[in-house]
Amino acid sequence: MPPQKPLSLALIGIGGVGQAFLTQLALLQSRLKSKLDIRLVLIRRSTTQILDSSWRGLDIATAIKQLQDKSSSEGKGKLLGFEETCVHLATAPGHVVLVDCTSDPQVAGAYPGVLNKGISIVTPNKKAFSSSFSDWQDIFGTAANGPNAGEKEKGNGFIFHESTVGAGLPVLSTLTELIETGDEVTRIEGVFSGTMSFLFNSFNPVAGGGGSFSAEVGKAKELGYTEPDPRDDLNGLDVARKLTILARLTGLEIESPTSFPVQSLIPKELESCSSASEFMDRLPEFDSRMDDLKASATASGKVIRFVGSIDVATKKVKVGLEEFETSHPIAALKGSDNIINFYTKRYGANPLIIQGAGAGAEVTAMGVTGDLLRVVRLLR
Amino acid sequence: MPPQKPLSLALIGIGGVGQAFLTQLALLQSRLKSKLDIRLVLIRRSTTQILDSSWRGLDIATAIKQLQDKSSSEGKGKLLGFEETCVHLATAPGHVVLVDCTSDPQVAGAYPGVLNKGISIVTPNKKAFSSSFSDWQDIFGTAANGPNAGEKEKGNGFIFHESTVGAGLPVLSTLTELIETGDEVTRIEGVFSGTMSFLFNSFNPVAGGGGSFSAEVGKAKELGYTEPDPRDDLNGLDVARKLTILARLTGLEIESPTSFPVQSLIPKELESCSSASEFMDRLPEFDSRMDDLKASATASGKVIRFVGSIDVATKKVKVGLEEFETSHPIAALKGSDNIINFYTKRYGANPLIIQGAGAGAEVTAMGVTGDLLRVVRLLR
């Protein structure tokens, strides 16, 4: 049996995705145990952290329990600053990987410094990749891999973020392979939000019918398909962030997720609502607008869907409502599925399509675990 | 600039896929030139080969010209045996990768010996992976990676074969990632043949209509969508080979592509036809059978498609005609596209779907080039 190589892992964020990742990690540890000794040496949440300074590896179940038990201080260290924690982490045995399962822009902002310490990053956190273009350049100018990677100082960390678009669906890996093998991506178009998918598949189904738009938003909220405040989905920004990431991977220098047209489904008159409940109460007043759009689409045998698209040649990125023939794969989407169409020179008129659940803790964690495996394969 | 590592490449087979691969290789050499010195040191076809014993790397254009020029013997070596050639290849600088762009079962049969010499293999050749289960075990018992990989002697080669199913579509990589991250694949179902896709999308379109079955076969043959002898598509064996590969990757011990039910679309009465042209001449006599199937599907609001499916729990694999609701993604397929549905525990009721062109020289070569990049990433 070959000697075990150590890999030290640090997890930040133990919400749904973080916890699903830990379950997948336990399976991975067991499957790879003869080849790789994966040790979880840090779990950190906003208020506290447990750092195993012996580097032997935490018992996951015990550590989670300690972190969640607010009354006990057992095993909990003082919350070191993130920077200070990373300096310490960099001295852990073997390669060190930071798993950022937060959506915290501050953690994301620290990525270049983390990579620079030789620590790799795997994350579903969109913030780092969809903020200013200079942040993107800082990250991929530092990482040992990536689209804009020049020649790096040896020893910098790798970074992977498959779950930032379409959760565990192989979206970024497919786009990267198309580009790396020399294909020319001409257009990307799809439904990139589980919430928007559900809303329009229900509001304007191919078979006809569907409830009022406000009723569908209410139903989506009840089913847990929206953010706690549905306006955070309806403003289109989540989709715009995903489009920003994809467009940058195709080589476009997108300044920010607000530097291209993004249609908000929040009626102008409700932009000043002070609470989610006030917004939900008043949304029905504007149902006729959405009904008109649906009727107009129906009149031409089409349905409306909330999509994002990137036209690579003209560098046009946009997010908003569009009409589709009922036979189009985007129209035929079901439930809260995402669909991503890659039009390329090689694939010709019919795109390469990836479709399936694009949200949810387990599938998001799957993208993170897959990224961890990508890092493992790159280890020297 | 870091020092260039050498990688020595040997290509067997210079048909459409081999030549498309060489075009992609030239782009790759240029893109990676500061990091990796990829040298093509052998091009071999059935009758001759050019081996660069200096290991400096062949000029691709010149070598192809020499190989295709049947009258000239310039630069052509005597055709060494394949085994002898591999012994020599194993002494080339850096890591050695064999790119098998043939569909030759004899080359495939030599894979364990090749891997054992530390040579990696990337290939779209289905033969090695869809023949007897003991051949499969020999390959993945020798390769340094793979589903059944135990602990290997250090230094054996890696093997990747993405293009054996769905050409360049990310089918095997997605299935592998689902399994490696701990998901449970329950069912795989899809259209795995561009020819069968075209035939049934034309013969029985969702919108109604379509020509006679024999006319559609004739049209597909004219458009180059079938093998020179269409019976090689209609017998279902090509699909059965792909299903064998997928089923084995999910852990099923499939003995051979004929060890499960495979429906042939060659009428029993025509099995004894001595030529493709006799077969094509007589096929119209049996059109009424296919018309009956279509009418019966239409009566229940469905269409017929030629699909393969794997039910992992019951270990049932089958290939043949099935009826689908017109709203099903398999019914809505266009042109000669493939579609692969992965049903898993994590993805729930709606499958993870991969769709697009599953045949053609460029997209097949893309899978091969992608596999070469996978090997490059694994190099120590």
Image (cartoon, coloured by chain):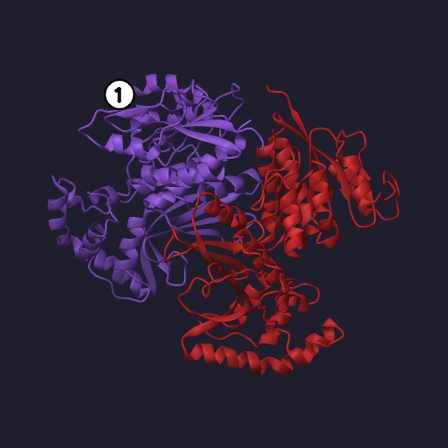
Chain colours: A purple, B red
Q: What is the x, y in percent for residue B131?
A: 66, 57
Q: Could you tell me the amino acid type at mark 1?
A: Leu
Q: Residue furthest front?
A: A1
Q: Nearer the viewer, residue B207 or B12?
A: B12
Q: Quadrant of residue A328?
A: bottom left
Q: What is the x, y in percent for residue B279?
A: 70, 75
> Where's the C terminus of chain B, which quadrant?
top right
> How many numbered discs, if any?
1
Q: Quadrant of residue A76?
A: top left
A314 vs A358, left or right, is right
Q: Nearer the viewer, residue A183 or B197?
A: B197
Q: Quadrant of residue A69?
A: top left
User: Quick check: can you spot residue B230?
Assistant: no
Q: Nearer the viewer, residue B206 or A49?
A: A49
Q: Nearer the viewer, residue B42 or A44?
A: A44
Helix, strand or loop at disc 1?
loop
B95 vs B291, left or right, is right
Give the residue at mark 1: A79
> Where's the N terminus of chain B, which quadrant?
top right
Q: What is the x, y in percent for residue B329?
A: 43, 62
User: Quick check: can you spot residue B328?
Assistant: yes
Image vertical order of residue B40 relative to residue B246, above or below: above
Who's the residue at 21% across and 50% down the image? A221
Who's the residue at 44% across and 19% down the image? A116
